[in-house]
């Protein structure tokens, strides 16, 4: 008989025989079972978590030191309400040089001001970057489909191989 459990992501009630199980070791060395709805949901959650960690690493590299200011997390969550961490990471990567130049040009030295300014730049640019990324992905998909269609078509026969007869 299966026990009842709860998904760690969406809090759905499940049973252990249906749920996707991950075993982790806690800080005391004890093995703990974590249950999720399915492996796809778990992988998507891990991907978002990794993107968030990459964003924080990138922010630390932009600032030049490890930032422990809670305003970074607050500003990141505000942007995350409208966009995924993957989109935020893409935008931050693209805008990194611009942000550093703006810090230098405007003489921004204080940590809080840098954080606010950085997220203002990201917030303004993320919509355009997301549209550009989606357009590029759509173009790649269209090109891929077009190439596959060409491969599926009949063999090309040169024009000179056709014989024409006149009809009266």
Image (tube, grey):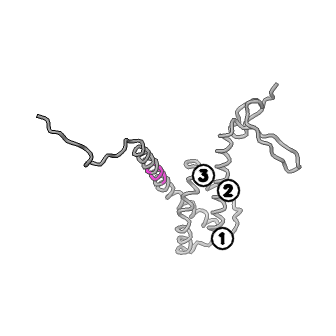
- Give the number of the mark in front: 2 or 1: 2
The disc label shown at residue 64, or none = 1
Magenta-colored segment: predominant secondary structure: helix
Q: Are marks 2 and 1 in contact (CB under 8 Å)?
A: no
Residue 71's image quarter?
Answer: bottom right
Q: Quadrant of residue 108?
A: bottom right
Q: Which residues are magenta?
A: 133-139
The residue depicted at 58 percent of the width and 49 percent of the height is 84
Label 2: state its secondary structure: helix
Spatial separation of the CA atoms under disc 2 and disc 1: 16 Å
Looking at the picture, tell me which residue is in the foreground, 138 or 129.
138
Q: Position of residue 8 (x, y in %)?
A: 73, 40
| Picture quadrant of residue 13 | top right
Binning the other alpha carbons within 10 Å of mark 1 as few (below 14), some (14 to 19) or many (20 upward) gives few
Q: x and y percent of residue 19 in the render?
A: 73, 33
What residue is drawn where x is 39% and y is 45%?
150
Q: Please tell me which residue lies in front, 121 or 109.
A: 121
Contact, CB < 8 Å: mark 1 with mark 3?
Answer: no
Residue 9 x %, y %: 70, 40
Earlier residue among tags 1 and 3: 1
136 with respect to 38 (left or right): left
Residue under label 3: 85
Q: Which residue is mark 2?
A: 53
Instruction: Give me the residue at 81% from left, 46% from top.
Output: 24
Q: Position of residue 114 (x, y in %)?
A: 60, 67
């Amino acid at each position: 008989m299966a026990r009842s459990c709860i998904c760690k992501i969406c809090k759905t009630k499940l049973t252990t025989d249906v749920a996707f199980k991950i075993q982790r070791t806690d800080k005391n060395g004890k093995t703990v079972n974590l249950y999720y709805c399915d492996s796809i949901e778990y992988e998507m959650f891990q991907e978002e978590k990794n993107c968030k960690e990459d964003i924080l690493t990138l922010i630390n590299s932009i600032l030049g030191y490890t930032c422990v200011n809670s305003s970074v997390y607050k500003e990141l969550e505000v942007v995350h309400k409208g966009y995924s961490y993957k989109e935020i990471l893409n935008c931050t990567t693209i805008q990194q040089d611009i942000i550093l130049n703006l810090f230098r040009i405007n003489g921004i030295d204080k940590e809080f001001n840098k954080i606010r300014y950085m997220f203002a730049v990201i917030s303004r640019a993320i919509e355009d970057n997301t549209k550009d990324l989606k357009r590029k992905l759509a173009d790649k998909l269209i090109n891929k489909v077009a190439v596959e269609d060409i491969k599926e078509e009949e063999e090309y026969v040169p024009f000179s191989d056709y014989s024409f007869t006149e009809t009266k």
